[in-house]
Image (cartoon, rainbow, N blue to C red):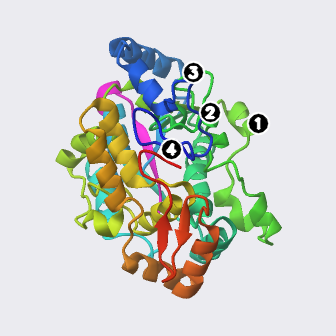
Amino acid sequence: MKYCTVCLQPDTRPNTHFNSGGVCPACDYYQHSRSIDWQERYEILRDLTKTIKRKSGQYFDCIIGVSGGKDSTRQALWVRDNLGLKPLLVCLSHPPQQVSQLGVDNISNLINHGFDVVLTTPAPETWRRLMRDSFFKFTNWARSTELALFSSVPQLAIKYNIPLIFWGENPALQVGDLKTMGNTGYDGNNLRYSNTLSSGHAWMLDAGYDANSILPYIYPDIEAFDSSKIQIVFLGWFLGDWGLLENASYACPVGLHIREEAPELTGDLYGLSNLDEDWHNMNQMIKYLKFGFGKITEYVNEELRSGAMDRATATDLVERYDGNCSEAYIDSFCEFIQITKQDFWAHVKESMNKELFEIDAMGNIRRKFQVGVGL
């Protein structure tokens, strides 16, 4: 395990590769972005939206997937107010046992801003069973739900004949998932190769699910994209101030509600992420045990790149908070998928990265690496 020489990104992130100087892709891109002509990029975006026009008889210019959080709130408002486009917003709604009041309030905020919003809700029992199966197969309960989340937008784009999809950040450039890189920095049609989507849905069929019951979880294939002329565009590529704190600064004054829990309970430094439900905080904990980094690492990395935080402070924050999760979130998750906490921890400990972590004599998980140094 090695760390980026600029930020605290470890090389354990899936699909990443450091350059010869030991710099991660996100830091390399950030350095490059400092010399970018952002006005020129804005003009590229304006030209692009003119070439991908709404089709005859179509009411919407584009489609945007939203949770109501900081990123999607900014995207929706920016596309409408700066580009003059009429977007259709699509929100994948969680079951009642999972959705948070914050999530409900933030989607309501977007509706109150005058947007048309389509709410889609896959069958709750299939959702629950797939979540349980995802947890035990991948030690990632969100593998199935994220398939539904990512699939809902292009599915509706094809159904409603809307060829332009706006997505937020380019995972290749802004977090380092290099397999998603398309023909240009804004081309998102290779999103299907991301770590999130690459497992596909075949494992669901292998597990005995009927094909019709998992339709919400099937990401449209390349042929469907091509025949409908679907183009995903990463909006973050065009914005010089796209980032965690910047997007929150844009969204909070227009009604975004954020978390009030301390980072000891959420593993979230500022309470800005995973607002629509609580269990992703737990998934960040599991990610930390598998790869050695969580949400705190992603926060401090942006501040390290910009020079807003020094490495010693960032290291201290990661050591104190990365991978933290409230027991209440674990309790409610176990109740939903109908397992005991003993079953939960037995599986998590079995799946954790044994090179990075160990279990002491008292059964507690201890990291073997030094934050900022590695192994």
Mark 2 or mark 1: whose residue is earlier in sequence = 1
Q: Position of residue 265 (x, y in %)?
A: 32, 70
Q: In x, y percent, where is residue 303?
A: 30, 38
Residue placed under numbered mark 1 in the picture:
223
Sequence-wise, which precedes: disc 3 or disc 1?
Answer: 3
User: Where 240 sits versus 345, above or below?
Assistant: above
The answer to which image quadrant residue 257 occupies is bottom left
Residue bounds of the magenta highlight: 81-94
The crowd level at tag 3 (other Cα within 10 Å; few <14, some 14-19, many 20+) is: few
Tell me if mark 2 has few (under 14), some (14-19) or many (20+) residues whose alpha carbon lies within 10 angstroms of its own. many
Please state if 373 lies on the left or on the right of 148 as rendered.
left
**Front tag of 4 and 2:** 4
Q: Residue at x 50, y 85 (%)?
A: 335
User: Residue 250, percent across and down?
Assistant: 24, 40
Locate residue 164, reporting x and y percent: 53, 32
Q: How many marks?
A: 4
Helix, strand or loop for disc 1: helix
Closer to the N terminus: mark 2 or mark 3?
3
Q: Answer with the quarter of the image where residue 188 lies.
A: top right
Estimate the spatial distance between the alpha carbons at disc 2 and disc 1, rounded to whole Å: 10 Å
Q: Are marks 4 and 1 in contact (CB under 8 Å)?
A: no
Amino acid on which the number 3 mark rests in the picture: Thr
Label number found at residue 184: 3
The crowd level at tag 1 (other Cα within 10 Å; few <14, some 14-19, many 20+) is few
The reply to whether the magenta stretch includes residue 120 is: no
Q: Amino acid at mark 4?
A: Pro
| Earlier-in-chain disc, 4 versus 2 | 4
- The answer to whether residue 82 is magenta is yes
Please name the residue that numbered disc 4 is placed on.
Answer: 10
Decide if residue 268 is on the left or right side of residue 90: left
